[in-house]
DNA sequence: GTTATCACG
DNA sequence: ACGTACGTGATAACT
């Protein structure tokens, strides 16, 4: 006779936990192992005594079950799970996995439904099998039949109790086991919040069912009852029926049953041994594995036997074969089991844990969590802080997750030393090289943790950056990712701390329970997003490389660069501000004189009316689509010789821009903590792969005008021992274009170090190199840029103020002289039309949805993007790789010099004077060799006491 | 929140 | 006949 044992894990764990309530077992590391120990003992006892041939262990899931759908209050008042149990569950699961015992878990169903279904099917399909449901839970009585028995484990002095149909009927005083639910329906069950009928307890229920047979029949014969009891049955008839329904175990759960899956087999001794050591279960270990001390078993124990279908390398067993792939289940496949209360496809999740988000706020709990984290291949984390700006942020909490559906929240005290002590506990986890750290926008977390002296080691995985490489033109917030890929809308941060514009609330003031839920959810979601995004990303091999070898290492570099910051000469800026103020006032006075009235010069609306209506400067003045006069720089420049006011307005605009955007704004962004400026480099904004910079934007500090470039004098070295070093790629985009197009003449010009714009001018204007005038060179330079942007005659004409026909002639001439470039351009556009995207040298994609549009404007725009994106993007790829290499060099050589800025084709350093020469040499070498192109690359280097001098 | 303008590569 | 260079971010005005 075969023996199938089905265990109700949660019921047994609870029972074990409370059995040890007075004298809990604690390991030397503070882990409470009572529940695991109790469960393990019970399990081993039954294995030894009963020698089952088949076995399975069922868990509840944290997901709402159909009973919740039916009855909202179901189990609602059950008190929260003790943390010791929460911590125990993963260990129990590991124990079972190590013993090669299958876990039975199905979202939407409780353990008793799963056990009931399997028990009934096993009995039906196998005459030669006896089924034992191992549980202390009385509800199971309803399932008992000839070959299905309840097996109550020994407890509190009482021995094992095996109950067949006779025993059940005797126990409840009923005629058939099915009436168990009628009894429960009447008496209710306080633990599960099944109400029953008021005034009816076990004894009364027994008596009534003995007499009437069922709840339904009792209600039908309510007239035969008397007094208060009659009243209650009448008034609570519905409640009684519902209670009966709730107590009914559902035996049609959509799980296939295959006896092969549940066959007993050998343990994985290596895993088991490690686990028992960890739990410090010495006696058990001896019983199970003999006397070998820890650490010597792996060589001596033969390879563990594995089940036919249970071989997954991660130790998870594919119990239900195809059903494990539940995400891919077509609805039709589950149609044969339609459940009227099911709103979604049943989901089988072998390792979904029972409870979701846990508060980890004691040393013991932290110890357990850390211990468990250290066993993972990858973990997900999220920091909660007091500020959006990482440099100014204090840790409020840390959320961690290592499997979907479960997360842990560790709150941090406001006291800095206490917080430091807690984060120090987690250091071994963060510094474990074997664990991949997953996070959304991980640069922020890296920066926050670095303030607490935590330098993360091992692989990083940023879901934001993964998505940036999948769809660079989209947005990459976690909320959007969750909605797109998980079909789930997370709790918004605004619900916790209010909008960021208005006096944004403090994370510290949020209730612990709420922040726990919010933070845990973030970690959980991010953890779930990772495999989904990675699966999509993996469709393109180069994307995975790009993420792992460029963007992830770069995010660490950027964290370093941002933390370092830049020193600003505030005294200088203060002086400059005063001068600008004075000049602005003078200019404004002159403008008012010239205009004859006072008005707001900063208002394009007012300004347009003054210029074009009052002064009638340009009779054919152009208007914007909103009906206003255009007063931009290019318009006013053309009026410069018409009227003095145009020049003055341009001056005023420049002064105001410099003052408000730079001179006055920059000092306000100095960190009170470091006294330096810390920009944010945005890694997932620019569609081409470039970085952007904000708060403040240090990538648009003026340089083109004499007054503007003065501002760069305010960017200074950290002290007298340092100087500013600036290294920029020379003509990187043109070189990349020449390489892509394989244009021999242009490649040769670069390889010979010739002036590329002059060379272009000579060719385009058909003169010898020494006949090229500065005007010709200027035009050629503009043309070269224009080519990269996807030239049009109109655009070129506008840019250098020539006629459209003249522009067209120049372009035609360019194509004649550089036919390879023209060929390359058409090839890129063609390939974009075919594939719908273009790629950079490292395979970074840009999708061009309008490339085949009927709308010419949209299509032309897409075509210009097709030309520009691979060039601009490849240059971005190259400087990113260079940054990683340079930072690596600085770190491995332990230099005092630091990278402090990056501006598309330029790297800026705070260079320690004694290191200047080696730094210059290495930076140059690493920049030009970052990515191999079939064209010579060059850099320009400058050193000075400020950023301007370094150019 | 959108528009116009202007700073950079 | 159309409507036009590529990629960003900050500010002030206005709705």
Image (cartoon, coloured by chain):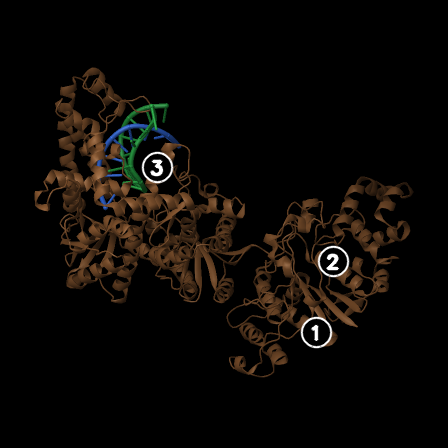
Chain colours: A brown, B blue, C green
**Mark sitting earlier along the chain (2/1):** 1
Q: Secondary structure at mark 1?
A: helix
Is residue A675 visible in this depiction of the protein? no
Picture residue at 46% right of the left edge, 44% below the top: A493
* Separation of marks 2 and 1 at Cα, in angstroms: 22 Å
Question: Residue A885 falls in which quadrant of the image?
Answer: bottom left
Q: Which residue is mark 3?
A: A861
Q: Position of residue A574 (x, y in %)?
A: 17, 41
Label 2 is found on which chain of the structure? A
Which of the image's four quarters has the N terminus of chain A? bottom right
* Separation of marks 3 and 1 at Cα, in angstroms: 72 Å
Same chain? Circles 2 and 3: yes
Q: Looking at the picture, does residue A34 appear above or below residue A334?
A: below
Q: Position of residue A612 (x, y in %)?
A: 22, 18
Q: Which residue is mark 2?
A: A117
Q: Which residue is mark 1?
A: A47
Viewer-closest of A610 and A533: A533
């Amino acid at each position: 006779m075969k023996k199938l044992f089905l265990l109700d894990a949660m019921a047994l764990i609870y029972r074990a936990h409370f059995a040890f309530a007075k004298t809990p077992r604690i390991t030397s590391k503070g882990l409470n192992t009572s529940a695991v120990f109790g469960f393990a003992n019970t399990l081993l006892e039954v294995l030894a005594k009963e020698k089952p041939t088949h076995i399975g262990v069922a868990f509840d899931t944290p997901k709402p079950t159909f009973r919740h759908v039916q009855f909202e209050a179901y189990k609602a008042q059950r008190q929260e799970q003790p943390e010791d149990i929460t911590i125990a569950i993963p260990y129990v699961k590991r124990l079972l996995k190590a013993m090669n015992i299958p876990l039975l878990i199905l979202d939407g169903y409780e353990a008793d439904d799963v056990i009931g279904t399997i028990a009934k099917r096993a009995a039906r399909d196998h005459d030669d099998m006896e089924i034992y449901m191992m549980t202390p839970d009385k509800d199971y009585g309803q399932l008992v039949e000839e070959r299905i028995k309840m097996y109550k484990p020994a407890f509190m002095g009482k021995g094992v109790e095996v109950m067949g149909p006779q025993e059940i009927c005797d126990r409840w005083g009923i005629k058939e086991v099915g009436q168990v639910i009628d009894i429960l329906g009447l008496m209710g069950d306080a633990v599960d919040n099944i109400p029953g009928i008021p005034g009816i307890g076990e004894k009364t229920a027994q008596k009534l069912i003995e007499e009437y047979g069922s709840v339904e029949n009792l209600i039908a014969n309510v007239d035969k009852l008397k007094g208060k009891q009659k009243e209650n049955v009448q008034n609570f008839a519905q409640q009684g029926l519902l209670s009966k329904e709730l107590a009914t175990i559902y035996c049609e759960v959509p799980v296939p049953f295959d006896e092969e899956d549940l066959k007993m087999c050998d343990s994985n001794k290596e895993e088991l041994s490690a686990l028992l050591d960890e739990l410090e279960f010495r006696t058990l270990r001896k019983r199970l594995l003999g006397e070998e001390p820890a650490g010597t078993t792996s060589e001596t124990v033969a390879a563990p036997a594995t089940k036919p279908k249970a071989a997954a390398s991660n130790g998870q067993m594919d119990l239900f074969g195809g059903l494990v792939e539940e995400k891919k289940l077509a609805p039709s496949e589950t149609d044969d089991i339609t459940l009227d209360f099911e709103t979604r496809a049943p989901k089988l999740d072998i390792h979904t844990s029972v409870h979701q988000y846990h508060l980890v706020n004691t040393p013991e709990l932290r110890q357990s969590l850390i211990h468990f984290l250290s066993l993972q291949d990858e973990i997900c984390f999220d920091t909660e802080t007091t500020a959006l700006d990482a440099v100014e942020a204090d840790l409020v909490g840390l959320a961690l997750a290592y499997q979907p559906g479960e997360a842990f929240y560790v709150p941090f005290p406001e006291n800095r030393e206490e917080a430091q002590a807690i984060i120090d506990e987690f250091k071994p986890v963060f510094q474990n090289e074997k664990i991949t750290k997953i996070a959304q926008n991980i640069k922020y977390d890296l920066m926050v943790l670095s303030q607490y002296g935590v330098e993360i080691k091992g692989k990083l995985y940023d879901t934001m950056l993964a998505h940036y490489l999948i769809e660079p033109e989209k947005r990459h917030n976690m909320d959007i990712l969750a909605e797109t890929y998980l079909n789930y809308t997370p709790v918004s941060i605004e619900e916790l701390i209010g909008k960021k514009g208005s006096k944004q609330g403090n994370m510290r003031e949020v209730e612990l329970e709420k922040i726990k839920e919010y933070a845990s959810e973030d970690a959980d979601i991010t953890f779930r997003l990772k495999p989904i995004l990675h699966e999509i990303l993996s469709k393109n091999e180069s994307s995975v490389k790009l993420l792992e070898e460029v963007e992830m290492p770069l995010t660490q570099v950027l964290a370093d660069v941002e933390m370092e910051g830049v020193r600003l000469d505030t005294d200088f800026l203060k002086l400059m501000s005063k001068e600008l103020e004075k000049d602005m006032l003078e200019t404004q006075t002159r403008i008012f004189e010239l205009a004859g009235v006072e008005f707001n010069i900063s208002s394009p609306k007012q300004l347009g009316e003054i210029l074009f209506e009052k002064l009638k400067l340009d009779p054919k003045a152009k208007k914007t689509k909103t009906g206003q006069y255009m007063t931009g720089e290019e318009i006013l420049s053309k009026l410069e010789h018409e009227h003095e006011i145009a020049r003055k307005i341009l001056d005023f605009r420049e002064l105001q821009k410099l003052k408000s955007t730079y001179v006055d704004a920059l000092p306000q962004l100095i960190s009170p903590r470091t006294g330096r400026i810390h920009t944010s480099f945005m890694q997932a904004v620019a569609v081409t792969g470039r970085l952007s910079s904000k708060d403040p934007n240090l990538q648009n500090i003026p340089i083109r005008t004499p007054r503007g470039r003065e501002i760069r004098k305010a960017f200074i070295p950290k002290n007298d021992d340092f100087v500013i070093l600036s290294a920029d790629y020379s003509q990187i985009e043109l070189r990349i274009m020449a390489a892509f197009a394989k244009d021999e003449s242009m490649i040769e010009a670069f390889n010979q170090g010739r002036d590329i714009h002059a060379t272009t001018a000579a060719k385009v204007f058909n003169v010898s190199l020494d006949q090229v005038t500065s005007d010709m060179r200027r035009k050629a330079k503009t043309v070269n840029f224009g080519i990269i942007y996807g030239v049009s005659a109109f655009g070129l004409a506008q840019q250098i103020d020539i006629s459209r026909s003249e522009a067209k002639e120049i372009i035609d001439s360019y194509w004649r002289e550089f036919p390879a470039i023209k060929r390359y351009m058409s090839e890129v556009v063609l390939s974009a039309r075919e594939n719908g995207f273009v790629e950079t040298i490292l395979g970074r994609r840009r999708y061009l949805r309008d490339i085949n549009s009927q709308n010419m404007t949209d299509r032309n725009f897409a075509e210009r993007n097709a030309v520009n994106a691979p060039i601009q993007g490849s240059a971005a790829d190259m400087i990113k790789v260079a940054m990683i290499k340079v930072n690596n060099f600085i770190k491995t050589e332990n230099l005092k010099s630091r990278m402090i800025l990056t501006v598309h084709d330029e790297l800026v350093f705070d260079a320690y004077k004694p290191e200047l020469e080696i730094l210059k040499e290495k930076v140059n070498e690493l920049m030009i060799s970052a990515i191999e192109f079939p064209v010579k690359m060059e850099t320009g280097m400058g050193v000075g006491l400020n950023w301007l001098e370094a150019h």
